Image (spheres, helix red, strand yellow):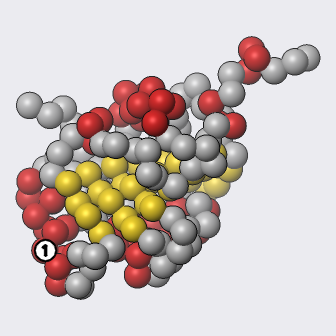
Amino acid sequence: MINSLAPFVPSRYEVVKRMLEVANVGSDDVVFDLGCGDGRILIMAVNNFGAKKAIGYEMRRDLYQQTLNEIIKQDLTDKISVINGDLLEADLTQATVITLYLTTSGNERLRPKMEKEIQNKAQIVSHDFRITKWSPSIKEEFYSHSIYLYVMPQAVIKKEHKSS
């Protein structure tokens, strides 16, 4: 049994757009959406921002199928992949941008995996929930939402390692 790291609450399209803008998504990016829900971030990353590739993980079979159907309908199967599985099993090594709308505890469970697998200069954008023990490069209030941008590896530099 896969444990959910967040309930399905779709991000408003304006928030999705702003998340992708904050990460400056472009044609060189491979965007991962962990807990991709209905796939709106994946589709917008490719259609509106020209991302090279978008990969989503969704554990709920109904949401996975809905997303897959939309990707097929829009003829985006060459650019978007969706996996019906546990995001904690995702191979994040190819990601240049990761989008999250989990919970604080979900982000905390994912954090060690991201620290281990995410490449240098990759960006993580989290909607509403911080990643504890990391320092965001940007924290933006957008409508009634918070958007956090973390850039690797700077985000994980521990305060105790900084010289005084």
Which residue occupies the extreme bottom position in the image?
Answer: 74
Observer-nearest of 118 and 23: 118
Dot 1 corresponds to which residue? 69
SS label for mark 1: helix
Q: Position of residue 163 (x, y in %)?
A: 87, 18
Vertical placement of residue 22 versus 94, above or below: below
Q: Which residue is drawn at 15% across and 59% down?
A: 64
The quadrant where residue 26 appears? bottom right
Q: Which residue is drawn at 68% across and 22% down?
A: 158
**Mark 1 residue crowding within 10 angstroms, few (<14) / some (14–19) / many (20+):** few
Q: Is residue 18 visible?
A: no
In the rendered image, the quadrant that contains the N terminus is: top left
Q: Where is residue 147 in the image (x, y as percent from the top left)?
A: 56, 53
Q: Residue at x 45, y 61 (%)?
A: 30
Is residue 58 shown left or right of residue 123?
left
The quadrant where residue 89 appears? top left
In the rendered image, the quadrant that contains the C terminus is: top right
Which amino acid, mark 1? Asn
Q: Residue at x 20, y 54 (%)?
A: 83
Vertical placement of residue 103 versus 20, above or below: above
Observer-nearest of 144 and 96: 96
Is residue 143 shown left or right of residue 8?
right
Q: Where is residue 76 in the image (x, y as percent from the top left)?
A: 27, 79
